[in-house]
Structures are given as structure tokens and as C-alpha cells.
């Protein structure tokens, strides 16, 4: 405990030092390293990671069981993919199913929200001894970003529990966007600070900070200075306009929807166009449907259906879907049985569904299956590390590449996960 407090104290000191002397609000997550090289088999250049927080019911969404009592009266409907059905709650996404690979055999042992979400993002179990980097931080560390001024890793409407860059340097953490409709805030000089004043402050910070970095072994000191340098460059760049979704025409904005998730996905598409490598968008709804399953789905699904369908269609129409891997993830599924007490479904990590579209994956494809009632994996189990390894492979990353934590422990991007090659055409 003593060493942990010491590390936290050092981290706080470094952060206060840098913020005090830089004279500009920090934009975390702007760092990128030179690309480590990508496989010639790589199809995807960018990833949009859609996270539906709370544990999405697979039976009520993408793994329906037609005619079964477990459906609670919800119908299954046909889709644009031959022989593939989804629940009636997703009529718009059903028309985009020819782009999607459903993985109906996802499985996990983590049935608590925080633990499941952590594994979904990092491929590791949450432990008190180390904080693992999220997938986006791995990707920008090894591949960099195609745009040298924009952040390579962006988190829109993310949870405070997001693991961020973990044991990687702070400049690899995602840039957090709380309100995707408000543009990139705190990205301009205060009115009271002139360009000349800023230049003098920057020079002073560089003079003092460089000596400080040389004298301290703490990695976050150099990381924060790197963040400052890149933030200053971005402040003067025309690329800031990419964060302003009001530049889109009214028809496009209406297609995505006026809610946070819709605005976030529209921003994600703009960021992909600008060369950003990894964008995570978290739905602002909570899919933890312990109570009144049918009512909750009736309220939540219209906006999610609208937004995800609009994103896939928009990317396709702009010729971006082939090079953009869109992923939908959640921390676990929900029980096949609907409670007679709460009329809701409980946590169920045994089997659930994630999906991917674009980026070289097959469209209109179903991988794996659950049993007749959606309680267990019946064929081809896929773990969260397996799926994350698949994302890495789609980008051309070496899933066996080793990075070491500050303590010297070796890690790979998806732990022991192996890519699901059957998803690729």
C-alpha cells in the first residue's frame, strides 16, 4: 500500500507540475508513435468500437429464439442476409445485416459489470496489482495514426472506469469527448492570452520541463510534455474542424439521430475520414435490464437501431466500410429466463453476441451458436481476448508482439486470445 501511495503522489506531482508550467489545458491521448509496420493482409485502417454498456440481452437482439417462451413474446424478423434473423427491435439494422458478421458464441466468466467491461477492453482480468492498457492504446502504440496532428485514440461518452492507457505512457490514453455535439472543448487559447504570451510560456515550459524530465525517471513527465506539444500543434490546425458535427448537412445529422449515441457515431465517422485510428463510442443508455425487459427494450432500442444502421450505411455509401472495422461489444449477455418477480433478465456471461462489420470481415455471416434457449455455447466458443485478437489481426498487427510493463512483465495485445480467422472473407 505504501508504494502505491508513493506512485500516486508522484503521478499527482508530475501532473500538477506540467499543468502549472505549460499554460494550456491538456488534451490527453494525443500521442502517437511511429507505426510498427502492418501486415500486407490488413484490410482495416481504422476501428469504430461501439460499446453498449450494461450487458445487452442476446436473445432480445441478435440471437433470437423464434417461438420459444424465453423470447417473452418478441418476434424474430428476417434480414438482408439470407437465413439470418434478429429480433423485431432492430428493423433498420436488419437491413444492414449483409455487412455484418454475428458472433453468437461469445463467452466469459465475468458476470460483474466492472469486471466484464474491463476484460472486454483489455483482454485481461481486473487485478489490484496492474492496470492493463485498453485495445485502443495498444493499436496507437504499435500502428500510430494516419493523421499526425489528430489523436489516434478517441473515447466518446466513455465511462470513468475505462482502463485508458493502463501501464502504457499517458499520451497513449484516449482523448475523452464528453459531448460529441459540442466540438473539441478547451482547444483554443483563452482570450486573455495572446500568441506571443503563449509562445513565451511554451519556451519557458520547455526550458524548465526538459531539465525536469532529465532529472526524473518518472515516465509520465515526458508523456505530459509530449501531450502539451501535440495539443499546441492541434490548436493551430485546420483539423480541429473535424470535431464539429454541425458541419454535416441536416439530412445526415437526422439519419444518425439527435441523441448522444447518434452524435457520437457521426463524429466517429468524421474522425475515420480524417485518419484517426481507433474511436470508441459508448451508448448513453444502460442496457442492464433487470426490471421490465420488454418495456426497457421498447424504450432503448429505437435510437440504438437507428444509429448503428445509419453508421454502417453512411460508411458504405462513402466507400469507407471496407477499410473501417465496426465492432459492437457489451460486457455479457442476459439470462434466457425472464424473472417472474422483476419481469427482467439477470447477468449471463455464459453466452452472448458481439458483431463486426467492414474491415475485411464477411457480411451476412454467423459464427458459432448458442443452444436452443440461448443459455450455453453450442458451437465454436469465442472469448473476449479472441475477438480483440481478431480486431488486431484485421489491422495487420502481430498478435504475438510483446510489450513489457514497467515491472518487466511481458504482455501481448490480446493476452492468450487467438484471431477468429473464419470471420474474414
Image: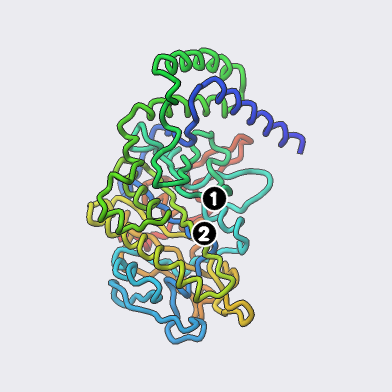
Alpha carbons under labels 1 and 2: distance apart: 9 Å
In the picture, measured across the screen, residue 375 lies left or right of residue 147, that is: right
Q: Is residue 247 above or below residue 24?
A: below
Q: Would you name the residue on which mark 2 appears?
A: 53
Quadrant, the C terminus: bottom left
Coloration mode: rainbow
Q: Evaluate if marks 1 and 2 touch, with contact meaning CB atoms under 8 Å apart.
A: yes
Q: Residues within 10 Å of mark 1 (few under 14, many from 20)?
A: some
- Quick one: SS at disc 2? loop
Residue drawn at x 29%, y 75% as measured from the top left: 82
Residue 293 placement (x, y as % from top left): 53, 74
Q: Would you name the residue on which mark 1 appears?
A: 159
Residue drawn at x 32%, y 37% as measured from the top left: 241
For the image, the number of numbered tags is: 2
In the picture, measured across the screen, residue 329 lies left or right of residue 217, that is: left
Residue farthest to the right? 2
Residue 136 placement (x, y as % from top left): 46, 45
Residue farthest to the front? 192
Q: Is residue 8 above or below residue 355?
A: above
Amino acid at each position: 500500500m505504501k508504494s502505491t501511495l508513493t506512485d500516486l503522489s508522484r503521478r499527482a506531482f508530475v501532473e500538477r507540475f506540467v499543468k502549472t508550467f505549460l499554460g494550456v489545458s491538456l488534451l490527453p491521448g494525443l500521442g502517437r508513435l511511429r507505426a510498427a509496420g502492418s501486415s500486407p493482409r490488413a484490410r482495416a485502417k481504422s476501428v469504430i468500437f461501439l460499446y453498449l454498456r450494461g450487458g445487452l440481452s442476446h436473445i432480445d437482439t441478435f440471437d433470437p429464439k423464434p417461438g420459444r417462451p424465453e423470447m417473452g413474446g418478441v418476434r424474430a424478423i428476417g434480414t438482408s442476409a439470407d437465413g439470418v434473423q434478429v429480433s423485431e427491435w432492430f428493423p433498420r439494422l436488419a437491413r444492414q445485416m449483409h455487412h455484418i458478421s454475428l458472433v453468437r458464441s461469445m463467452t466469459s466468466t465475468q458476470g460483474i459489470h466492472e469486471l466484464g467491461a474491463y476484460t472486454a477492453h483489455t483482454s485481461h482480468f481486473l487485478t489490484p496489482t496492474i492496470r492493463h492498457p485498453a485495445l485502443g492504446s495498444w493499436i496507437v502504440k504499435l500502428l500510430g495514426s494516419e493523421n499526425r496532428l489528430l489523436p489516434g485514440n478517441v473515447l466518446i461518452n466513455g465511462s470513468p472506469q475505462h482502463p485508458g492507457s493502463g501501464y502504457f505512457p499517458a499520451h497513449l490514453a484516449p482523448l475523452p469527448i464528453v459531448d460529441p455535439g459540442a466540438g473539441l472543448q478547451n482547444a483554443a487559447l483563452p482570450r486573455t492570452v495572446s500568441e506571443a504570451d503563449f509562445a513565451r510560456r511554451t519556451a519557458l515550459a520547455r526550458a524548465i520541463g526538459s531539465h525536469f524530465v532529465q532529472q526524473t525517471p518518472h515516465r509520465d513527465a515526458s508523456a505530459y510534455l509530449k501531450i502539451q506539444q501535440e495539443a499546441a500543434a492541434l490548436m493551430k490546425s485546420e483539423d480541429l474542424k473535424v470535431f464539429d458535427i454541425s458541419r454535416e448537412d441536416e439530412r445526415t445529422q437526422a439519419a444518425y439521430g439527435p441523441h448522444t449515441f447518434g452524435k457520437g457515431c457521426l463524429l466517429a465517422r468524421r474522425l475515420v475520414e480524417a485518419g484517426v485510428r481507433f474511436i470508441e463510442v459508448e451508448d448513453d443508455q444502460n442496457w442492464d435490464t433487470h426490471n421490465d425487459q420488454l418495456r426497457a427494450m421498447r424504450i432503448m432500442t429505437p435510437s440504438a437501431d437507428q444509429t448503428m444502421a445509419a453508421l454502417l450505411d453512411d460508411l458504405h455509401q462513402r466507400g469507407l466500410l471496407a477499410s473501417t472495422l465496426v465492432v459492437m461489444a457489451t460486457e455479457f449477455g442476459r439470462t434466457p429466463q425472464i424473472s417472474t418477480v422483476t419481469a427482467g433478465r439477470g447477468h449471463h456471461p455464459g453466452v452472448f453476441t458481439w458483431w463486426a462489420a467492414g474491415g475485411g470481415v464477411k457480411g451476412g455471416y454467423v459464427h458459432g451458436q448458442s443452444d436452443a434457449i440461448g443459455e450455453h455455447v453450442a458451437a465454436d466458443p469465442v472469448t473476449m481476448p479472441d475477438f480483440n485478437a481478431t480486431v488486431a489481426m484485421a489491422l495487420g498487427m502481430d498478435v504475438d508482439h510483446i510489450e513489457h510493463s514497467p515491472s518487466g512483465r511481458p504482455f501481448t495485445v490480446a493476452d492468450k486470445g487467438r484471431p477468429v480467422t473464419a470471420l474474414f472473407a
